[in-house]
Image: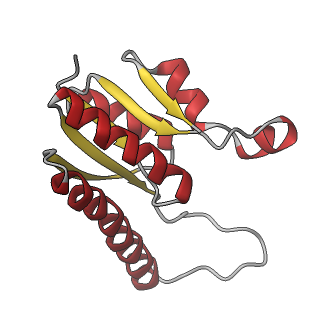
Amino acid sequence: MYDRILVATDGSKLSKKAVESAINLAALCGAELIALKVVPRYPQSYFEGSIPLSVEDVARVEKQWAEDGQGVVDAVKTAGEAQGVKVKAVLAKSDVVSDALIAAAKKHKADIIVMASHGRRGVKRLLLGSETQQVLTHSEIPVLVLR
């Protein structure tokens, strides 16, 4: 059915449900699991009145985000391998999560993307956007959305 399953995670409680489902699906299908965490880049511009960070501070912040992200995907790898699933832990740096997810799915030749949705509606969705909606709209492969 599926040979490679990409699961998007940010380490949140909701994404852990998606990870658990993706691990179970991979085990059922005998598929490889690609655990992806998208790490943002530090904003280069700043708002009026804020204090810009030095190049060294920006590098320190980005390094910390990468280390935290690696911890998230390593936890997925540990959980998957405990169930006999081969897991590849992947970090992607991008300011646009949906684009990074779709690009990673193409790069790793995933057959399906598994991700969670916060189910925001109304003004919250308008203000915060919906990465899930963007992936659903632009992905060329199936997307399994969990809530």
* Res 75 quadrant in image: bottom left
41 is higher (above) or lower (below) than 50: above
Find residue 48 and report its horizontal and vertical position in percent.
77, 71
Q: Quadrant of the C terminus?
A: top right
Q: Residue at x 33, y 32 (%)?
A: 103
- Residue 104 seen in the figure: no
Find residue 136 and report its horizontal and vertical position in percent.
53, 22
Q: Nearer the viewer, residue 134 or 82?
A: 82
Farthest residue toward the right? 123
Q: Residue at x 55, y 63 (%)?
A: 43
Residue 139 relative to residue 34: left or right: right
57 is higher (above) or lower (below) than 128: below
139 is higher (above) or lower (below) than 123: above
Find residue 42 and report its horizontal and vertical position in percent.
50, 66
Tally the numbered discs: 0
- Residue 99 seen in the figure: yes
Q: Quadrant of the N terminus?
A: top left
